[in-house]
Image: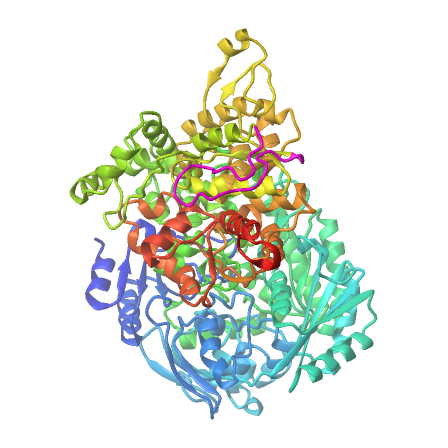
Amino acid sequence: MTDLEAALRKAVRGEVGFDVTSRALTTMDASNYRRVPLGVVAPRDADDVAAVLEVCRAHGVPVVPRGGGTSIAGQATGTGVVLDFTRHMNRLLALDPAARTAVVQPGLVLDRLQEAAAPHGLRFGPDPSTHGRCTLGGMIGNNSCGSHSVAWGTTADSVRELEVLTARGRRLRLGREWAGAPDGLRELVEGDLARLRTGFPDLPRRISGYALDALLPERGADVARSFCGSEGTLGVLTEAVVRLVEPPPARALAVLGYGDEGAAAEAAAGLLEHGPLTVEGMAADLVPSPAGLPRGGAWLFVETGGETAAEAHARAGAVVRAADVLDAMVVTDPAGQRALWRVREDAAGTATRMPGGTSLTGAGGGSEAWPGWEDCAVPPARLGAYLRDFRALLAAHGLRGTPYGHFGDGCIHVRIDFDLLTGAGVARFRRFSEELAGLVVAHGGSLSGEHGDGQARAELLPRMYGAGTVALFERAKAVWDPDDLLNPGMLVRPAPLDANLRFAVLPRRPVDVAFGYPADGGDFSAAVRRCVGVAKCRTATATGPAVMCPSFRATGEEEHSTRGRARLLHEMLAGELITDGWRSTEVRDALDLCLSCKGCRSDCPVGVDMATYKAEFLHHHYAGRRRPAAHYALGRLPRWLRWASATRAVRVVNALASVRPLAALAKRAAGIAPERALPGLAEETFTRWWRRHRLAGSGDTAGRHRPGGAGDTVVRHRPGGAGDTVVLWPDTFTEHLSPSVGRAAVRVLEAAGLRVVLPPTLRLPRGAAGDGRTRSPAALLAARRGRVCCGLTYVSTGQLDRARAVLLRTLDLMGPVLDTGAPVVALEPSCAAALRADLPELLPDDPRAAALAARVMTFAETLERHAPDWTPPALDRPVAGQTHCHQHAVLGDTADRRLRDAAGLTGELSGGCCGLAGNFGFEAGHYEVSVACAEDRLLPAVREAPAGAVVLADGYSCRTQLAQLAGVRGRHLAEVLAEGLEERLAEGPGGRLE
């Protein structure tokens, strides 16, 4: 333990982290920069902050305040001690509806303040797109704005008073009329009034530099306002009194379509006279699908308010009539507005991956784009001209970027495809930065219009303000922080804009990996680079269908967020902090609580796929080494279940598992959580039932009893339909643990007129799919018996060599199917996702893998595409439950929604992850997190379900979690429809039961 660490542990009541993981998690924010801190402290209160400052001042170590770590200019990184306010100093201390003020701590996430203010008809005005994870302290430090700044201004406009600790430990309460000003600040200002009155551009979004002009006497000598935007360089914020606003009760959203972003930019300023709440702009390049948007190549999102919905709609209509547009729409439905705003909010991440082009390494999959010139601002009336010049400058440097952002304030966000890996690329980055700074100044603008200067732009402040004003900034810094203790290298005496780039430490050659990473050109480093730090995964609460990130919501720890894990993988590849590569215990421990839900694959704006990265890591980490017992027991589950079935040992296994002492021993040996009950195995597998079902269907089976266990009923149908042939995938869970789902699916598919077959179990030289016949005795002798398997359990435990072997065997067996046009119906969403995504990524060079992946359909997709005229039974019941996380992330649930609607199953399923997640929730040490994930959304949704609701859970894990934690039986959609068919068949004339 170092002297500094020991001194901090003695002086501070909060957590002190000098370990590798704590440091690695804070090397980066959402910028291009990386600095390795000495340690991280999570102070419990202002006294702890004072103690940290005293210890660090004595040791000559810098201090960097940090909120959500979403800063884009590098100001939340540092080489000294990082103060993490999100862990303890994150409370709303008071809210006064009458005065419309709130007292907050710096680590309070903005959305928590908004939630508390909403019942009083109030809100905090500024709302950055990171509102679900950015903190009030960070917003004050950056003077953040957001989409509603045309109505409610910047964070500085919403600040009343600030409690601040100076680097030398003085506690100040900042306010107007010089309240709380440190000694010497007033003299500095009064000695240079002329410069302060003439040297600052008059812009709604001037964020660059220190706001010393707020100290002018005619502006109320507002010390609190001047502190906003100082990026943690002047003092450490410990408490703030902020102003709240009263938003209009009703809102409407006018979406205006234009030919390009230039036309949209020209129009934006003219709409301000209508008093909109927002005027946001974005181009088609940032929209994955323009469906639901008006015709055009760029759009303005103009929000209007009113006392009533009609008034808000009328104002939006006035905006549309005043705008010269190609097309327009007005949305008043709150859900529709939220969906459109999500498109805009995700742009920061979406812009990081540009279609076409190549990655930094020259590989395919789209070019990477980066911040650095993320938020320049010009007078709104100059925006169109500025964008034209900006586009020309990009072209002159051979760069690409898609502008978007706060067009009504003249503030433009853009990610640019800089090459930040090579010396030549970095040199071009510098040349472009210098020329763009000149362009912004020529248009009367500010280098930063929202995110601050940090390291990205501070070096260029003399071009905007001149040497004299920058020297004044340095003198102001010396008044507040004479020892240069707080966030040195930012704003004054800055580090060069091309130093400390986070890409410099990464390997130059692709590392050897098992997955193909087709979207990243096969480069694992490029895959890890996808995480730019916008931290959508750190959103503590989720609504709608979102899944990411259940482990973070359960623990609240950065290392259990998608971003935290990506940061650790980045440091593993860098090899500076984490020096043992794939053998790293720090990375292993962080990934241990990853549920492999794949939520980040769809919910992360840049498509980070931590489930795949986890499997990759585990593959390398345990190569040639003994694995955890659960990897053998659960990772190889298909083998053990096939063995139990083949040896007719199912009844014995079930009997032994019911004896508590024996079950406890078995769970301990297998690495299974002692709190978990062992599921019972089906005495008759699905395929055994299938063989009897087919034999029974060889003649007229109307009215014949279909045996096979409890729940079977009299059926009146022909087992083989005359329609399309579909291949029903007998996944491990349906086969051995829940065959009733398979039986129900067969019942429904055949009722829809489809001919159901199973995959071949013999690898034949030639033969028809599922016909059970061979061409000749010689072919039979040459055949090899086997079972298809998606390899899911092997992938989730990182046994990728075994997974590949299983998948190759599966492809051999599926050869005859691939020679036909038959779809493959997967009932278990996780297995369907493995076939759609993991299969082609593990076997990228085998064309059969992509062919099979393209054939895989969900149960609902199969009915929709291959039996479009079939009418499901009218069930007319509400539903509750959860969309399977893999279905949400990989497969989509549009067809399921339409099928439920057609069957009269009303209501929405929740998002999130059930928490069992295959092997995860069964593994020892995961039970508490597994339960917490279930309590996040699934269990509350089921508890709040209306009477008589059907609990839908297509995944075996989801059904098991519901049964074990809530005593509720969840059912696959196929089971519910099959039950409806039985009821329909049993009805006689007039609806009476026979």
Q: What residue lies at 61% left-to-right and 56% top-to-bottom? A: 989
Magenta stretch encompasses residue 947: no
- Quarter-wise, where is residue 817 in the image? top right
Residue closer to the observer: 693 or 774: 693
Instruction: Pinpoint residue 955: horizontal percent, then vertical percent.
Output: 45, 47
Instruction: Pinpoint residue 717: horizontal percent, then vertical percent.
Output: 58, 40
**774 up-or-down from 350: above or below:** above
Residue 573 showing in the rendered view: no
Q: How is the image coloured?
A: rainbow
Q: Magenta span covers which residues?
A: 699-724
The overriding secondary structure of the stretch rendered in magenta is loop
Classify residue 350 as left or right of residue 792.
right
Image mark count? 0
Magenta stretch encompasses residue 711: yes
Classify residue 311 as left or right of residue 218.
right
Instruction: Pinpoint residue 755: horizontal percent, then vertical percent.
Output: 61, 34
Residue 897 showing in the rendered view: yes
Residue closer to the observer: 474 or 505: 505
Residue closer to the observer: 169 or 683: 683
Q: Residue furthest top?
A: 778
Instruction: Pinpoint residue 963: horizontal percent, then vertical percent.
Output: 35, 53
